[in-house]
Image (cartoon, rainbow, N blue to C red):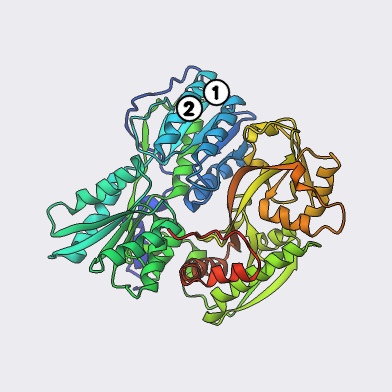
Amino acid sequence: MPQATSNGLSFSFIFCFLFSFPALSLNAAYLVTAELKLQAPFNKSLKTQQNLTIAYLPPATEYNFYLELGEAIRTKAVNKNWNFIMRAPQNGADWQLHVEMIKEVVSKRTDIIIFSSFLPTTDKAIAPLLKQAVEQGSIVINVNSDNLNLGYPVHALIGVNQRSGTRALAQHVVTLLQPGPAKIAIIEGEPGQFSSERVGGFIDGLQGSNISVAKRVNGHWNAVGGYYATLKILEDTPNIRAIFAANDFEIIGASAAITHRNREDILLYGYDGVSDALALIASKKMTATSAVNAARIGLTTFEVIVDIINGKFKGGFVENPLETVTIGNVDCFLDETQKASIDIQIETFVLAAETAQDPQIENNNNLYIELIKAIYEPLGIRVKFEPVPYKRAEYLVVNQRVDAMIGNFRGHSEGLYFPQWHYHSQQIMALFKKHSLLWQGASSLSGKRVGWLRGYGLDRYIQVDTEKVEHTFRSSALKMLEKDRIDVYIDDQFEILKANDGLQQNKLDLNHYQFAKLTQLKLYPAFSNTAKGRKLARIFDQRMPLLVTSGKLAALFKKWDQTYYPFEPE
């Protein structure tokens, strides 16, 4: 681009200022555009800004979008010396756990409750809980939604007009594919208001054109689902010219699929404007997205909270602007680290992995190291392995001393950068002596001495008060369970069985014990939040599905004696 104009400003700067101003003005005054069907009253709301607690409850930590939104709120809360807690299931489909987490913060009369929900089942279950929260005097705010007809009262609804954003994307498709005719495909999300509005707006934007929708597939809101949905689309309708997905995570999966099928002639459109999608646009592997700007919604949310406390906010839908991002303006939306990640060349990759006096951990490391090498070494990137304890590995990645770590639960720690694909998942079970308690779900752990491995943070999936006991080694945890020094041990069932088999003496007789499922957690590599780390994460998302669909990953799991394989065919 030209570097200067007559007044000394670069053309690039002026372009961004004129056409992407909403993305830059995070502190601009917010705009209330509509009334809510059920507006929570303000007569019981907080009257002080001292020692407040914010509970942020997004639908899942598997979505970077919600992590970015929450980080913007957390930063503002810390500056005011307010407490900030985030509660979320890892998987967007685990709506029951999401409901339990909302129930917990309501029962504790938390000052400020910020939540988001995209599943009708969740909305129905939380309606009485949120009504109770409002009656108790909590400030209740729904973020990233434009549903004015919620079945429960909230003080504010903060989001964007989803239908207008996707309508603009469709008009961009029409411009590129006219005069047509042409066929396109749509990757939907799980049924609900989010998917219907985004898909509906896109279809609205096609009206009057010669472009028709040949195929619609549910991508389940994530990259794995988007990948398999795209394979299905290419198999059934190979002559399509474009794919629209209801969020960027699905289109990230679609991008990998069309690359693997040598169909990069297909235009790709997403929704959200997450950083990984913006990088794909800059790399010309994606056509456009509708940028919501999660950080701006987070900052607007905090501003609304302060105004509620000061009596300045009277309720309604706070609408944030949307921006269509293409190759022509993507530079205006990328941060400096992401820009640097586009063209960075990588020769070596330093990977930290957990090590301990536990044969099963070493066995797992052999599997994971082979997996990582299979992803990166064909590209000429040499992988170096640094064995350290789990918490040390996390410290090294956060402080950018190594490039990544193996075995992190997404959303547990700050300062890490995650890909969209996981490489394994764990079946988290509660192990206890038979007849020692009557299992009725996680609530059965109330008041019990509950142990887990140090650094795993599994207490965030237990919505009752327990006596928490962390262990360095699985073997020592099992011995404490046998000697009644803890009541329950929670961990992956496969890991528990392997650890017990590895005991030289005092093995547990599992006939006297009971397993009960607590949750399922996906395992991810966690990368440093650097240009190199972000590039490595994108490579992981592009190449990981190749290992899955080719059968190479299943062969590695079999080679290293892993009885549970986490990627069943979609």
Q: Is residue 36 above or below residue 31?
A: above
* Tag 2: amino acid: Ile
Crowding at dot 1, Cα within 10 Å, few <14 / some 14-19 / many 20+, comes out as some
Indicate the position of residue 176 as horizontal and vertical percent values.
Answer: 21, 65
Residue 463 sits in which quadrant? Answer: top right
Foreground of the two, 560 or 392: 560
- The first of marks 1 and 2 along the sequence is 1
Crowding at dot 2, Cα within 10 Å, few <14 / some 14-19 / many 20+, comes out as many
Task: Examine the rendering and report whether any part of residue 77 can be seen.
Answer: yes
Q: Is residue 280 above or below residue 271?
A: below
At numbered mark 2, what does the secondary structure look like: helix, strand or loop?
helix
Q: Which mark is residue 413?
A: none
The quadrant of the rendering that contains the N terminus is: bottom left
The quadrant of the rendering that contains the C terminus is: bottom left
Q: Is residue 129 above or below residue 43?
A: below
Q: Tell whether 125 sits left or right of 173.
A: right
Indicate the position of residue 478 as horizontal and vertical percent values.
Answer: 80, 48
Residue 185 sits in which quadrant? Answer: bottom left
Foreground of the two, 136 or 338: 136
Q: Which mark is residue 46?
A: 1
Residue at the spot x=70%, y=56% of the render? Answer: 495
Residue at the limit of the structure toward the front, as seen here: 511
* Tag 1: amino acid: Leu
Indicate the position of residue 72 as horizontal and vertical percent values.
Answer: 53, 46
Q: Tell whether 119 sits left or right of 498.
A: left
| Residue under pointer 2 | 308
Foreground of the two, 302 or 255: 255
Contact between marks 1 and 2 (CB within 8 A): the answer is: yes
